[in-house]
């Protein structure tokens, strides 16, 4: 869907050619907080992120932060109070597909298409470790609250259990035939439900082995005084472990049954509400299935009722049946509530269960509509009622054609269901008209009517003032692929899949229902060809007509006689778009072979072939009164080219998926584009000059960043490529951070050498000579070189520290270790320096231990770190004890207040009871 709200987005470019400033009208996704108030639907907050598309969202348990995963593998944590980014994590090489916080919000786990699972420390802002094991994309991740365990599922049809204490996969569930798309924990994390590519929801019982042993063990054997009992218990445990599978020593996971969904396709989303009482799932259709999960008390009550019924039945039948034979089925414990059918296919959902028993469900649909449903669970037959809907006046399907009016004010966009007219200055939709599947369009001269060519071969003529359909003409037997207005503005030409090019003229006809005449179109001529027509264009002088055919050629004909003039051949795949320059000397063609060719119209010679896009070139148009032209491709990019110098000028990046079409305003100041990402984007030419050398430099930097991301990650000495690894990845930011550390150490070395020379000069002169201060140190307030190194080290992001040190050459490590010893001895930044020190010792262990010059440094570091860490631990323990004392004090005060309130209420009830007794006695 395309939104009528077009937010401004500025290009970060300065150049000597006219640059382009984009204005995007993309439907922002509203947050959940204001959806729960159906009467007030106002946008609360916009979180502005990176250029990449958002692939995953996860709110923190306290509701103050939102973790956002992107297509490039990065994760950003936003503050919902300020709307700013607090933390950025870079570790994945592909799109983030799953995010989950632990119950305290201190850790964040992410899964990706690169098959890796990474656990992040949100408080310390760094990655803890990377878990490898899945053979395909990770689809879902779950933390277990009580145990330090993690459950992950993937498209490899596996569900893996990870022990986060040892970072080891100790169990793998292999009971699925297809990809596992979703998981949910219910019944206080004692049951796991998985959804895969079939209509079956598999239910697994989770049993913790330690709990089983503790419950089976007699109380006498748990006491510390009985040593024979302890030995006997140990022997029993050892025999139990020998009989068990090694995977089952921590957790047993046993399949107990299945719940059948009504949908036959795969599960898209499977989730529970925060209480775990409601389970819901949906597939690729428009139906959300809602289930109710009974608690242990409700299960027990239901079992008692069932036993009473069984006893009554046995009395009538005079048969005795043991009570143990009465059991509840899985369908009794997980009951189907209802099915909610949305207005379109569901993309994702969320739900909240109120204390009054009302369930609020928010659905995000594939056509970018958000619907809110209320479901009363206490009713005898729960029925979902749509409370509100958030929608904006955009298209529900992909826009396939765009056009500008002659006065540069109105924009026409047409899709499979409607034609919309937008005001460029106010950015609002001013007219909507129903239509068939539109493929091409144009404004009739005067801008009061529009003509739309459809997939069924019809031409539809609309009046903009009334928004009505004036006339429908059966123009072609196949799809109308292209339409072009004649230069004299008296008619137009169309090309279709029926191998015909048809010429049309505007005329005024008298309508039977009205006295006034109305506009109509009249078929004048037809040009029959041997192949399907994909695109048609007039030359500016209206002497030539260019026709693109399915046989990969472009034929040029004379307009007056329709005689053949030229054939342009050279593309390997069909030409999808083309345009002729304003002076009629050049024609540029864009093809599905990803190339753009520039031809001369005088002799039909190919001036240059340009590799334009990474996928098919979908649209091409010249800028008015110039030889500059724009191209749009399926790679999601819009590019500007110079047809005289055959140079690429700039790339406009903003769309996330295929760009279907674009349109330039007649004055050349605006470009509007439509994409498969459900957005229209308006780009504005600015007055800032554009320097091509700067553009090339920016392009080279972007290519270098991409190459760095694709490089093999550095191998840590002593580590094998097993289940675990470092969480971060090598990026351009980590390389820059390492370079800053290296520059700081170089400055430290230079300053130390200068200081020695200065000391020698002072001794030789016998007097003090002024020492020249480095300008960098002076800018920092005349600090010492060692303090400067510490300042640079502290500015490295916590999430990039390990990767920056991994890139750092070993020649800088000895100086760093000596400086670390000095810093830790002074007691500054002990935690940060110990973390960096331990990582350096880990990756350079062999070189450090073999270097005799560093033996004394390591010994000093050992003493200083142990003493300083002990002091920090003591301070932390003292503070923790103080906080616990304050907590107990507050709880004690609350308990006293609570008991005082309870006593007062008890006294009031006692007085009321006595009054009632007196009234009863008086009546008697």
Image (cartoon, rainbow, N blue to C red):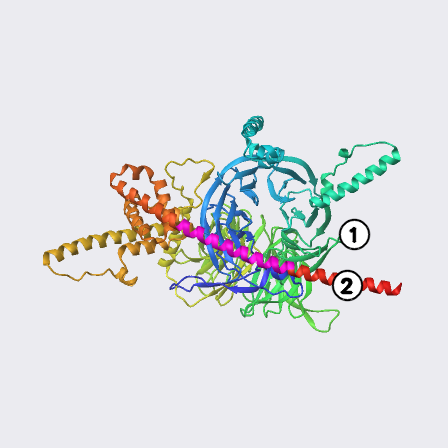
When the figure is inspected, residue 362 is found, relative to residue 190, above or below; the finding is below
Looking at the image, the residue that sits furthest to the left is 765
Per the picture, the main secondary structure of the magenta-coloured stretch is helix
Does the magenta segment cover residue 612? no
Q: Is residue 571 visible?
A: no
Secondary structure type for disc 2: helix
Look at 13% across and 58% down and name the residue there: 762
Residue 330 appears in which quarter of the rendering?
top right
Q: Nearer the viewer, mark 1 or mark 2?
A: 2
Residue 720 appears in which quarter of the rendering?
top left
Look at 38% across and 41% down and name the residue there: 714
Residue in front for this viewpoint, 494 or 441: 441
The earlier-in-sequence mark between 1 and 2 is: 1
Q: Is residue 496 visible?
A: yes
Horizontal relation, residue 493 to residue 769: left or right = right
Secondary structure type for disc 1: loop
Residue 163, given in percent of the width and then of the height, sits at 52, 39
Horizontal relation, residue 77 to residue 328: left or right = left
Residue in front for this viewpoint, 873 or 156: 873
Residue labelled with disc 1: 380
- Whole-number angstrom distance, CA of label 1 to CA of label 2: 37 Å
Range drawn in magenta: 872-899
Q: How many marks?
A: 2
Residue 486, given in percent of the width and then of the height, sits at 56, 63
């Amino acid at each position: 869907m395309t939104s009528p709200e077009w937010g401004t987005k500025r290009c970060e470019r300065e150049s000597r050619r006219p640059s382009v400033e984009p204005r995007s009208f993309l439907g922002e996704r509203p947050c959940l907080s204001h959806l729960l108030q159906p009467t007030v639907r106002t946008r609360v907050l916009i979180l502005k992120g990176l250029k990449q598309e958002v692939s995953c969202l996860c709110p923190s348990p306290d509701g103050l932060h939102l973790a956002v995963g992107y297509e490039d593998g990065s994760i950003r944590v936003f503050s919902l109070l300020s709307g700013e980014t607090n933390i950025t994590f870079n570790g994945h090489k592909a799109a983030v597909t799953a995010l989950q916080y632990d119950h305290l919000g201190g850790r964040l786990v992410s899964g990706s298409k690169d098959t890796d699972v990474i656990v992040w420390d949100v408080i310390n802002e760094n990655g803890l470790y990377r878990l490898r094991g899945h053979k395909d994309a990770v689809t879902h991740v779950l933390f277990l609250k009580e145990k330090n365990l993690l459950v992950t599922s993937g498209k490899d049809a596996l569900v893996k259990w990870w022990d986060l204490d040892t970072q080891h996969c100790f169990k793998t569930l292999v009971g699925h035939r297809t990809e596992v798309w979703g998981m949910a924990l219910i019944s206080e994390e004692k049951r796991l439900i998985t959804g895969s590519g079939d209509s079956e929801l598999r239910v697994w019982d989770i049993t913790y082995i330690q709990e089983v042993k503790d419950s089976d063990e007699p109380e006498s054997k748990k006491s510390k005084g009985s040593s024979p009992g302890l030995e006997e218990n140990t022997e029993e445990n050892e025999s139990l472990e020998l009989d068990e599978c090694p995977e089952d020593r921590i957790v047993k996971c046993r399949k107990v049954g299945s719940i059948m969904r009504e949908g036959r396709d795969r599960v898209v989303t499977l989730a529970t509400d925060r209480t775990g009482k409601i389970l819901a799932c949906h597939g690729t259709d428009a139906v959300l299935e809602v289930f109710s999960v009974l608690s242990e008390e409700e299960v027990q009550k239901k079992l008692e009722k069932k036993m009473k019924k069984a006893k009554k039945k046995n009395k009538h039948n005079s048969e005795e049946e043991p009570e143990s034979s009465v059991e509840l089925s899985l369908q009794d414990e997980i009951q189907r509530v209802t099915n909610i059918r949305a207005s379109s296919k569901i993309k994702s959902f969320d739900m909240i269960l109120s204390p009054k028993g009302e369930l609020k469900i928010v659905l995000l649909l594939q056509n970018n509509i958000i619907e809110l449903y209320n479901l009363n669970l206490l009713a005898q037959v729960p029925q979902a009622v749509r409370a509100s809907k958030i929608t904006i006046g955009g298209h529900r399907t992909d826009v396939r054609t765009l056009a500008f009016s002659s006065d540069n004010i109105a924009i026409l966009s047409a899709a499979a269901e409607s034609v919309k007219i937008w005001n460029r200055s106010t950015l609002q939709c001013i007219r909507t008209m129903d239509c068939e599947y539109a493929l091409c369009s144009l404004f009739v001269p005067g801008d009061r009517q529009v003509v739309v060519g459809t997939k069924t071969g019809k031409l539809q003529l609309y009046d903009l003032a009334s928004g009505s359909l004036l006339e429908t003409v059966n123009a072609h037997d196949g799809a109308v692929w292209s339409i072009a207005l004649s230069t004299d503005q008296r008619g137009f030409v169309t090309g279709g899949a029926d191998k015909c090019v048809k010429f049309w003229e505007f005329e005024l006809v008298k309508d039977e229902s009205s006295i006034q005449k109305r506009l109509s179109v009249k078929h004048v001529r037809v040009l029959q060809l041997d192949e399907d027509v994909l695109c048609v264009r007039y030359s500016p002088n209206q002497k030539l007509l260019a026709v693109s055919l399915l046989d990969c050629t472009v034929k040029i004909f004379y307009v007056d006689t329709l005689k053949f003039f030229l054939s342009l051949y050279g593309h390997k795949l069909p030409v999808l778009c083309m345009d002729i320059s304003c002076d009629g000397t050049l024609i540029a063609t864009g093809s599905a072979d990803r190339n753009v060719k520039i031809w001369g119209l005088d002799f039909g010679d190919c001036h240059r072939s340009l590799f334009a896009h990474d996928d098919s070139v979908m649209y091409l148009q010249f800028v008015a009164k110039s030889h500059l032209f724009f191209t749009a491709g399926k790679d999601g990019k819009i590019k500007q080219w110079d047809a005289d110098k055959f140079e690429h000028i700039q790339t406009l990046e903003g769309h996330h998926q295929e760009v279907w079409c674009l349109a330039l305003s007649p004055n050349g100041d605006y470009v509007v584009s439509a994409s498969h990402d459900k957005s229209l984007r308006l780009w504005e030419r600015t007055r800032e000059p554009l320097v091509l050398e700067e553009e090339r430099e920016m392009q080279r930097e972007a290519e270098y960043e991409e190459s760095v991301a694709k490089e093999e990650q550095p191998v840590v000495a002593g580590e094998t490529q097993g289940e675990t690894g470092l969480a971060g990845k090598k990026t351009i930011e980590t390389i820059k951070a390492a370079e800053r550390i290296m520059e700081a150490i170089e400055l430290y070395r230079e300053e130390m050498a200068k200081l020695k020379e200065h000391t020698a000069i002072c001794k030789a002169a016998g007097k003090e000579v002024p020492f020249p201060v480095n300008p960098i140190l002076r800018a920092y307030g005349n600090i010492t070189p060692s303090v400067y190194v510490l300042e640079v080290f502290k500015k490295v992001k916590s999430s990039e520290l390990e990767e920056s040190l991994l890139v750092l050459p070993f020649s800088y490590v000895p100086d760093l270790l000596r400086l670390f010893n000095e810093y830790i001895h002074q007691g500054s930044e002990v935690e940060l320096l110990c973390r960096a020190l331990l990582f350096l010792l880990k990756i350079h262990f062999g070189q450090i231990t073999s270097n005799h010059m560093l033996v004394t440094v390591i010994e000093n570091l050992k003493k200083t770190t142990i003493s300083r860490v002990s002091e920090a631990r003591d301070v932390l323990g003292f503070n923790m004890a103080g906080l616990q004392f304050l907590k107990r004090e507050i709880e004690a005060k609350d308990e006293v207040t609570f008991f005082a309130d309870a006593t007062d209420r008890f006294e009031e009830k006692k007085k009321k009871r006595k009054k009632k007794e007196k009234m009863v006695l008086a009546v008697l």
